[in-house]
Amino acid sequence: MEVFKSFRLFGLYFYVSSIRMKRRRTIDEKMRNHHKELRKKKLLLYKLQDGCCSNCGRHFGSEALEIHHLVGISENPGLALATSNMVLLCHECHVKVHRKIDPRDEI
Ligand SMILES: [Zn+2]
Ligand SMILES: [Zn+2]
């Protein structure tokens, strides 16, 4: 009886861990694609906004501007890559905007 139990536990352990590893790989791949997409969107937005922060209107290099999601990703993950849901903000404005929305929200 005891042997049967531990065998089952052993089997369950391996079953769970292999699924976890598989899932982690898919997430890594998704994140890589996501970052690639974000870079493309950022360049697009940079052109659309003429390289200016959409809040203060000052001009910045593309590296200095950050993507801000109007609807937070945690609120609606489906809008994470929607251009209409993104604006570029300088770091200063980005921090300010997030403090206003929800100080606990991640940028
Ligand atoms: Zn700004
Ligand atoms: Zn933001």
Image: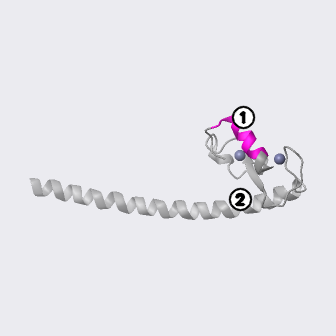
Tell me the tag on residue 9: none
Q: Residues within 10 Å of mark 1 (few under 14, many from 20)?
A: few
Residue toward you, 103 or 37? 103
Q: Secondary structure at mark 1?
A: helix
Q: Is residue 52 left or right of residue 100?
A: right
Residue 84 lies in the magenta-colored region: no
Residue at 32% over, 60% down: 15
Q: Where is residue 49? Give x, y as percent.
A: 88, 53
Q: Residues within 10 Å of mark 2 (few under 14, many from 20)?
A: some
Residue at 59% over, 60% down: 31
Q: Residue furthest front?
A: 92
Q: Quadrant of residue 14?
A: bottom left
User: Relative to 9, does residue 29 appear above or below in the rendering?
Assistant: below
Q: Is residue 9 left or right of residue 88?
A: left
Q: Amino acid at mark 1?
A: Lys
Residue range corresponding to the magenta coloring:
93-103
Residue toward you, 36 or 5? 36
As measured in the structure, the alpha-carbon distance from the residue carrying label 1 to the one carrying label 2 is 24 Å
Which residue carries the number 2 mark? 38
Which residue carries the number 1 mark? 100
Residue 99 lies in the magenta-colored region: yes
Q: Is residue 16 left or right of residue 78?
A: left
Residue toward you, 56 or 14? 56
Residue at 76% over, 58% down: 41
Q: Earlier in the sequence, mark 1 or mark 2?
A: 2
Q: Where is residue 10? Give x, y as percent.
A: 23, 59
Q: Nearer the viewer, mark 1 or mark 2?
A: 1
Colouring convention used in this rendered image of the protein: one colour
**Mostly what secondary structure, the magenta segment?**
helix
Q: Quadrant of residue 55?
A: top right
